Amino acid sequence: MKNMGRLITFEGGDGCGKSTQLKLTADWLRGQGKDVLETRQPGATPLGAEIRGLLLSGEFVPVPECELLLFLADRAQHVQTVIKPALENGQWVLCDRYSDSTLAYQLAARGLAEQTDLKPMLAFAEAGCIPQRTFWLDVSADIALKRVRTRTDMGAESTRLDEEALSFHERVHAAFLEISQQDSERMTRVDASDHIEEIQKQIQIHLEGLLVA
Ligand code: TYD
């Protein structure tokens, strides 16, 4: 049977430094001889880029139900056209955000969890592509917001969700904490206030088991 790749996801509040860690992890895995694909959600496919614009530019304010469905639409397109083929090709796929972001931002922070059980819809969009390991870069909501504001002041793009109130980002944080406790086999919490090198070392230690598996 063909050697399947691995799906590793990086999660965390806005401004937690996960993109930096994803890049460092990709470089390290390549050094270990792995074929690595770096990608992200939302917006990694041509259709997804359009959805990303609709979701984050601030031109539109979708109702929570619409926001959720658009994130799922982006994921379905990304999984079927990029992630699944890459995994079937034996690649290691490192994805900046995945379903845990939907659980934290839409289901928890927007309060959709109270309405109905939406987990089957998340599974539908994932189409069987479940991460072998997820790293949650844990940084408190207020520090994360400060980092985002500094980045924005320096000219970086700020998204509609970056502009949400502190209480929204606190609900996101609480949701990631709960997921990491409930699904501790898959999700590893990493203290994002550590030095970049220290965080990266921890990530590498956690991935070593997967390298030989
Ligand atoms: P992005 O500019 O990619 O920033 P970062 O990942 O560095 O924070 O913004 C993506 C935004 O989309 C971010 O605020 C989280 C949000 N998001 C959701 O609300 N639900 C989701 O399912 C995903 C994938 C992202």
Image (cartoon, rainbow, N blue to C red):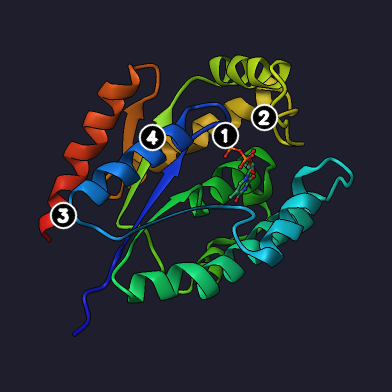
SS at mark 3 in the image? helix
Instruction: Report the disc number at residue 211.
Output: 3
Q: Is residue 100 left or right of residue 161?
A: left
Q: Is residue 61 left or right of residue 44?
A: right
Q: Amino acid at mark 1?
A: Val
Q: Earlier in the sequence, mark 3 or mark 1?
A: 1
**Quarter holding residue 159:** top right
Q: From the viewer's perspective, is residue 165 above or below residue 120?
A: above
Instruction: Report the disc number at residue 172.
Output: 1
Q: Amino acid at mark 2?
A: Phe
- Residues at discs 3 and 4 in contact (Cβ within 8 Å): no
Q: Position of residue 170 (x, y in %)?
A: 59, 25
Is residue 87 in sight in this rendering?
yes
- Residue sitting at the far left: 212
SS at mark 2 in the image? helix
Q: Nearer the viewer, residue 188 or 194?
A: 194
Query: Image point 77% across, 36% down: which residue?
Result: 160
Q: How many residues crowd mark 1 within 10 Å: few (<14), some (14–19), many (20+)?
A: many
Q: Nearer the viewer, residue 116 or 202?
A: 202
Q: Earlier in the sequence, mark 2 or mark 4?
A: 4
Inter-mark Cα distance, 3 to 1: 31 Å
Inter-mark Cα distance, 3 to 4: 18 Å
**Quarter holding residue 125:** bottom right
Q: Position of residue 37 (x, y in %)?
A: 40, 58
For disc 4, the marked residue is 21
